[in-house]
Amino acid sequence: MTPTPLLSVILPSYNNGACLPATIRRIRATCPKNTEIVIVIDGSTDGTPGILSHFSGHLIRIITRKVRRGKGAAVRDGVRAARGRFIALIDADRAIDPSYVTQGLTWMQENLSLDAVIARRNIYHTGAVRLVLHTVFHWIEFLLFRMPYHDTQAPMKVFRAPVAKAVFMNLQTRSYAFDIEVLFRTMVRGHGVAELPVLQRKTPSSLRWNLLLFSSIELLRMYRTYIAHLVIGLFLRKRHHQPCIDAYSLRHLILWPLSWPMLWILQFFYHFVKKPMVVNRANLPIYTSKKPILVLQQRPT
């Protein structure tokens, strides 16, 4: 009988075949010996399966998707297949060194109140344009969802397996905005989250305008779903004669009506830039879903 791995590391990969062998070796060198590595090949065209053919063993698992579905969908499939007692997500290009995964794992083993550890990049090695876009995106998600985390998009997160399975079970976001949906689900479920300071090495950026627009569209769709469940929750609390709203939540009276024209504007612009660009790791297919992202059990405090 195969023993249960202590840790599963999920590596979503789109045309990262050249980086993966070094990443696998680095994970083996810095993570516990009984660490499972789950590689999700998301429609790659660079021959990644052939590059990984010489890696074998029950702790190396490869999931191949012939059609690209997006980073969020790839990570979700990896989490569903993971067998470890802890589940970590990192980028295949080692933008953040896997040794930080071990640090996050140690934190969670020493503190049972922690259900997740996420990276917080103190030094962000990237171009000025991407840094500005990252900052703007962070403030938008904070304004809409009021999440207290400093760096939602950092490519390193470690979860206890039951928490990860529950959070990723019905993940709807398939773009690069999936981190926000994951952390939002984690927050409203009341799980303890700690932020681990990390250093990010400079790697080629996959951020493109079409991806940024699509991620913003998904963000607004998530916000509209959140508001719908918030209104239902307020109605139920009102029926039970409990306080129905706080002063900070009144911001939704302004933001929610504005989210509709903003969504239409972004969809209009995305219609013209959605065609794949002739660059690596740039194109994402269009996904639409009318399913709610989450039936909220409680409102963020």
Image: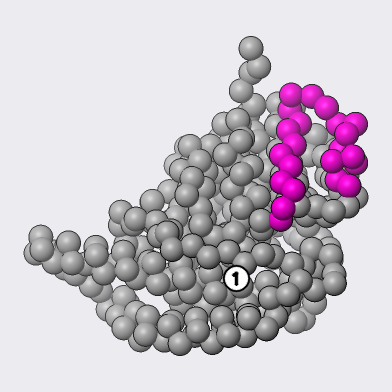
Quarter of the image for the N terminus: give it: top right
Q: Secondary structure at mark 1?
A: helix
Instruction: Give 225 or 110, whichever is nearer the viewer.
Output: 225
Q: Residue furthest top?
A: 1
Within 10 Å of disc 1 (Cα), the crowding (few <14, some 14-19, many 20+) is some
Position of residue 124 in the picture relative to residue 77 (left or right): right
Q: Indicate the position of residue 195 as horizontal and vertical percent values.
A: 57, 56
Is 45 drawn above or below residue 78 in the view shown? below
Q: Would residue 273 appear left or right of 166 to someone viewing this image? A: right
Q: Position of residue 125 (x, y in %)?
A: 79, 69
Nearer the observer, 251 or 151: 251
Type of amino acid at the residue the image marks with label 1: Ser
Q: Which residue appears at 89% of the width and 47% of the height?
A: 47
Q: Please say whether residue 54 is one of the residues in the magenta stretch.
A: yes
Residue 187: percent from left, percent from top: 43, 56
Residue located 46% across and 67% down the image:
222
Residue position marked by numbered label 1 in the rendering: 215
- Residue 114 in the image: above or below residue 230: above
Residue 110, magenta (yes or no): no
Decide if residue 192 is on the left or right side of residue 135: left
The answer to whether one can see residue 234 in this image is yes
* Residue sitting at x 41%, y 86%: 258
Based on the displayed image, in which of its 4 quarters is residue 210 positioned? bottom right
Read off the magenta span: 47-68
Quadrant, the C terminus: bottom left
Which of the 4 quarters of the picture holds residue 225? Answer: bottom left
Residue 296: image location, x then y, percent: 33, 57
Q: Residue at x 66, y 58 (%)?
A: 70
